[in-house]
Image (cartoon, rainbow, N blue to C red):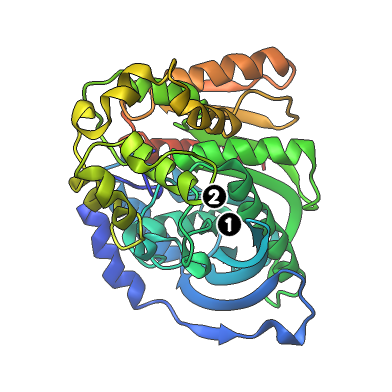
Amino acid sequence: MKTQKLLRRPYKVLCFLWVVVMGLWACHKENPEEYHYQYVTDYEQVNTLVKSTIGNLYALGAIQEPTLLNLTESIQSSVTIYKISYTTTFQGYSKIASGLLCIPTEQGTYPLICFQNGTNTSHAQAPTQSYSNATFTLITSLAGQGYILLIPDYFGFGSASDVVHPFLEKESSNRSILDMIRATREFLDHYEGEATYSNKLYLMGYSQGGWATACLLEALEKENTTGFEVKAASCGAGAYNLESVAAYMLSRDSLPSPLYLPYLVYSHQKYGTLTGNLNTYFMEPFASRIPQLFDGSLSNTEVNDQLTHRVSDLLTAQFIDQFETDTTFNSLKVELAANSLYAFTTRAAVHLYHGDHDENVPFSESEQLYRGFLELNPSVRPELLPLSGLNHSTGVTPWGVATLLWFNSMQ
């Protein structure tokens, strides 16, 4: 849950690539009015990554994360990157949302990857706002492996930054992603480049993105009207059972990243699904700070710096001691259950990755989900892949590389 993008660790060497990339991208605005789009409202080419830049990116990144070299030999194409805006629905009303769409420049028919990024509190660090930084340069380069890659912003960011992000709210997460998949198909049907698409869809995400990926797969198994067939899903370090994750946090003396419970409670209160006020859950001065902390102006680190890691200083004694028994917290328990992800029947291959030293989201989250998947899907044989010796932050890049190598093996 701590990561907001594919790379969370501060790879200083990768930041050098920002200078390189900024010299390679070109922007030009497009207007979709010449076609009668149902979903796409606007698009703009925002970046281009050539094959040599992608290779250099992996080589430099390998200084700190050697597994990146495993992707070097499978670079197939340069990549053109677009920001697209599309129509969707939020809280029962029409809404414009956005995301990145990354398309190989080489002629070919490519499967899709839908990438769900991790927890983010900053408008400036949404995918469509930070596509040229070192982290998202690495993420978008994955399209060069031979995929059409889409990265939704989520509600609360990009074109939908005028609303508070509904953190870990299943229905809105699924809606924003599903409609971007539909918008992507619509965009590609009129695309004038060399790439065309197959009907294969791969899903991947880490932390909040791991949870969102699993929720999306569940939704697609119930009803898939996207026109794509899900082949595989890679879920990294997700907080799948929100009830058990909340109990884990309440049992701790300190939290490595204290923003998660305030983010969830505040955003769900904002949309009327939780009763009580912030002082029911949080101590002062933090309860009064929370609305400003999640207005999109601060990064995860900056939000954490305005909170406290000590649980007894952050949360009320009533919340810590009586969460299970006090009816005051019934609405929160209902909300956590409604947005938890439990095992379901799936025809797709599923890999669950999780660092066995993760203190943000316990390894048991993936372990429990794996057992449920295995019981319901013995023929598909889901896999649990521990990231040995790694925590929530250090597991991100190894998960990403392992996922791409797995997807590549299916082509």
Residue at numbered disc 1: 149
Determine whether 230 is above or below 390 in the image.
below
Along the line of sight, which residue is nearer the eye, 320 or 175? Answer: 320
Residue 302 in the figure: left or right of residue 323: left
For the point 38% across and 63% down, which residue is it? Answer: 123
Along the line of sight, which residue is nearer the eye, 108 or 102? Answer: 102
Q: Does residue 166 appear anywhere in the picture?
A: yes
Residue at numbered disc 2: 115
Counting from the top left corner in percent of width and height, residue 50 is at 46, 69
For the point 37% across and 20% down, which residue is it? Answer: 248
Which of the labelled discs sits on residue 242, or is there none? none
- Whether tag 2 and tag 1 are in contact, CB under 8 A, the answer is yes
Count the labels in the image.
2
For the point 46% across and 21% down, which residue is it? Answer: 244
Q: CA distance from mark 2 to mark 1?
A: 7 Å
Amino acid beneath label 1: Leu
Quarter of the N terminus within the rendering: top left
Along the line of sight, which residue is nearer the eye, 77 or 186? Answer: 186
Amino acid beneath label 2: Phe
Counting from the top left corner in percent of width and height, residue 26 is at 45, 81
Marks 2 and 1: which is nearer the front?
2
Q: Secondary structure at mark 1?
A: strand
Quarter of the C terminus within the rendering: top right
Residue 382 in which image quadrant: top right
